[in-house]
Amino acid sequence: MANILIVEDDEMNRDMLSRRLQRKGFSVQIAVDGLEGVSMAETVQPDLILMDMSLPKLSGWEAVSAIRRNPLANSIPIIALTAHAMASDRQRALEAGCDDYDTKPIELPRLLEKMDKLLVARSRS
């Protein structure tokens, strides 16, 4: 099953999402801030990244930009996770280099559908 990197600073959100994904058969890695997320994108080489956009040390926006500049990690699909639900937030996430966007609180079936589309597309490339 796919290896997912969750970059999330909120412990409750992190634990809830990681447990739910593990129950679905995913292998899960955790980063608790943007700097750790950038580092782990290169060292872990996950199949997909779920990136909170409001992070300490390095925001999700900055972390996504750093990952996209790294030739060892720039092809990893990234889904932005944010509590901001404005249409402009989705556009901003896509412009920052995210492949998709989802809002919090997380609706797992919707997120899994987005993850599946990106993972299938990545496996074909």
Image (spheres, rainbow, N blue to C red):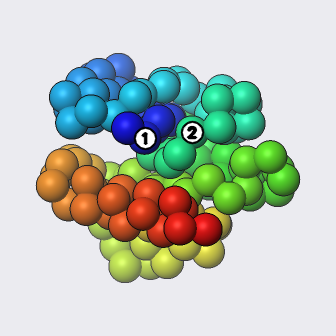
Q: Quadrant of residue 28?
A: top left
Task: Please state which amino acid type lies under the numbered disc 2.
Answer: Pro
Q: Quadrant of residue 117?
A: bottom left
| Disc ID at residue 2 | 1
Q: Can the viewer see residue 111?
A: yes
| Disc ID at residue 56 | none
For image coordinates 49% across by 78% down, the residue present is 91
Percent x, y for residue 27? 40, 28
| Disc ID at residue 46 | 2
Q: CA distance from mark 2 to mark 1?
A: 8 Å
Q: Which quadrant is the C terminus positioned in?
A: bottom right
The reply to whether discs 2 and 1 touch (Cβ–Cβ < 8 Å) is yes
**Does 40 sit left or right of 114 as displayed?**
right
For image coordinates 45% across by 46% down, the residue present is 50
Q: Which quadrant is the N terminus positioned in?
A: top left
Percent x, y for residue 52? 46, 44
